[in-house]
Amino acid sequence: MSFIIYLSGIFTGFYIQRSTIEYTEQRIQSLQRRLENVQLEYMYLSTMGKDVSCNLLSVLVDETNRELWDIGKQLVSLENTKDEPERISELTSEYSLLSVRAWILNSYTNERCEENKVVILYFYSVPCPECIQQGKILDELREKTFGNKMRVFVLNTNSNESIVQDLMRTYNIVKTPSLVVGNSTYIGLVDKDELEDIITTSLS
């Protein structure tokens, strides 16, 4: 009986893990379509005037960013399990490309629409205990302090995508965790108080 219960636990865990991966994959595909729609909406709304396009675009971008951030946290959890590494690696690559596209859109929108928001690139790797800690700090500041004034885009430095490697070279990312806030690079773990000061200064 104990052996049957043990096997049942293993298969249940495997099923849950696979379901989580499939769910994450579906969310990435959905977000891919949403981001494409946001970019199309931006192109369309830009022809209608700056004020209208910026107001609506800001709402669309904020919604996309929230989902992107949630998927990123789920994907990091999956990466740390080391189950189905090839499939998770593919999902990570797709997510990285989405993050870069969203980061570019946000950076351009922030400048064109004169939004007072901080755009952050967060570079992490697996395994990396300090990256987990940095992620929690970013999560806390985003949820409890700055809200949608703070936009974070997450990139895995182990990604083979050329654009990720290009960004690492551009911002001199030599270890993880690392943050790019505006045009400034911060190598290594940035504690909560220091990061809060950095973001506050960028918003002022």
Image (tube, rainbow, N blue to C red):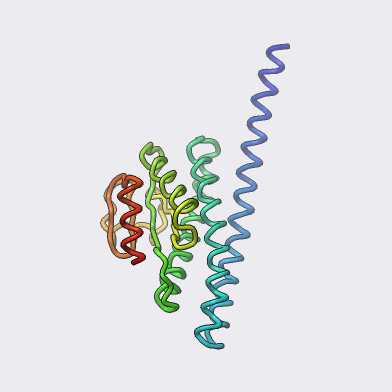
Question: Where does the image place residue 181, in percent across and percent down from the top left?
Answer: 33, 60
On screen, residue 84 above or below 35: above
Q: Indicate the quadrant containing the C terminus: top left, top right, bottom left or bottom right.
A: bottom left
Question: Where does the image place residue 149, in percent across and percent down from the top left?
Answer: 45, 63
Total numbered circles: 0
Q: Residue at x 62, y 54 (%)?
A: 27
Specify the farthest residue to the top.
1
Q: Nearer the viewer, residue 203 or 129?
A: 203
On screen, residue 199 above or below 76: below
Question: Where does the image place residue 123, in percent across and percent down from the top left?
Answer: 37, 51
Res. 179 image quadrant: bottom left
Q: Nearer the viewer, residue 165 or 175?
A: 175
Q: Residue at x 67, y 35 (%)?
A: 15
Q: Residue at x 60, y 44 (%)?
A: 21
Query: Is 57 placed left or right of 131 in the picture?
Result: right
Question: Where does the image place residue 109, in percent across and percent down from the top left?
Answer: 45, 74
Res. 106 image quadrant: bottom left
Q: Residue at x 50, y 52 (%)?
A: 143
On screen, residue 25 above or below 39: above
On screen, residue 131 above or below 180: above
Q: Nearer the viewer, residue 14 or 120?
A: 120
Q: Indicate the quadrant containing the N terminus: top left, top right, bottom left or bottom right.
A: top right
Res. 189 image quadrant: top left
Query: Is 81 placed left or right of 114 in the picture?
Result: right
Specify the farthest residue to the right.
1
Query: Is 31 placed left or right of 50 in the picture?
Result: right
